[in-house]
Amino acid sequence: MASELRCGIVGPARSRNGLGPYLARFAEAAGLRVVAAAGRDSERTAAACASLAAALGHAVAPHATLAAMLAVERLDALIVATPALAHRAALELALAHGCAVLCEKPLVAPQESAAIEPLLDGFLARGLALVENCQWPFTLPAFRALWPGLAPSARSFAMGLSPAERGPAMLEDSLSHFVSLAQAIVRIDARSAVRVPTPARIGAADSAAVLECEFVAEGSVLCGRLELSVVEHQPRPAWYAIDGHRVDRAIEMPGYRLAFETGDGRRKGFEDPMRDLVYGFAALVRSPALDRIRAESESIRHRARLYHAILDACRRAAR
């Protein structure tokens, strides 16, 4: 019998926009036994562990810090569900302890972009999976089921998201989703670039923004448009369109059942894309094929490069 794969989570009790409990439950279902969690608030961490224990059917040990958790727990994998400012330190600790990581997006805080290359190189050198939580590409089969006649080479796409935070944070939090969807529509590699003719100009109190850019890849141009409008509570509206063919996400509560709807009344249900992403991560932890780890690393590398190019252009425009 194969040995048990043990998983920890840092940030299990994040209260605003927090995905920690969902990620932990999907990891458990995918065969990663969630045995421990760490958070900076000991009371909330203990409560989160008690809640997870009730849901998973076994104890989840609380720890005051990630370092303390890694010092006493033998972990094969780590879920990083903290705000972005804590990502870099968590990734460096996980790498030092030989843990594969599923990390909330963006991979590191925007001001720490110089850390991305060394982190990716370090995980790759040790044959450890590093996956960023970008889920939207997993919804494309449902989109294509509703719009089966689209040409294979798209010329444009648009996306509408509803972040919870105002000001520049709404772009920083949403941009990974936008770029990851572009990656799924057109092949983006080291030769690809992004042009930003219409950057988002976002003030500290702004609750809406529009960004237009052009992804130059494989000798073609994919025009992208991102529309952001703050919605503080779930369920938050979201949609995207490829070459003018649009789907809107519908969330049926309770149960969090997902579907896409079209303007002409058609509807297609689909599994939570976070589930598919976590299952893929668990498969890499279970069978760490270097070619798949390298492909994931390169995807993050190219996404991060374009993410920061767009963010820099928007910052310059806002001055």
Image (cartoon, rainbow, N blue to C red):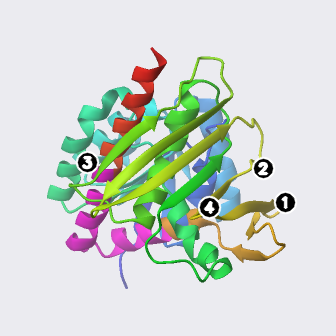
Looking at the image, the residue that sits furthest to the top is 319
- The magenta span reads 278-302
Tag 4: residue type?
Ala
Which residue position is annotated with label 1? 253
Tag 3: residue type?
Leu
Which residue is drawn at the image coordinates 21% and 43% (left, top)? 117
Tag 1: residue type?
Met
Q: Is residue 29 magenta?
A: no
Which residue is drawn at the image coordinates 58% and 28% (left, top)? 41
Tell me the mark number nearer the camera, choosing from 1 and 3.
1
Neighbourhood count class around disc 4 (C-alpha, 10 Å): few under 14, some 14–19, many 20 upward? some
Tell me the mark number nearer the camera, choosing from 2 and 1.
2
- SS majority, magenta: helix
First in sequence: mark 1 vs mark 3: 3
- Residue 157, quarter of picture: bottom right
Which residue position is annotated with label 3? 95
Disc on res. 241: 4
Q: Which SS class for mark 3?
A: helix
Tell me the mark number nearer the camera, choosing from 4 and 2.
4
From this view, report whether residue 153 is shown above or below residue 9. below
In this rendered view, identify the residue nearer to me: 113 or 217.
Answer: 217
Q: Are marks 4 and 2 in contact (CB under 8 Å)?
A: no
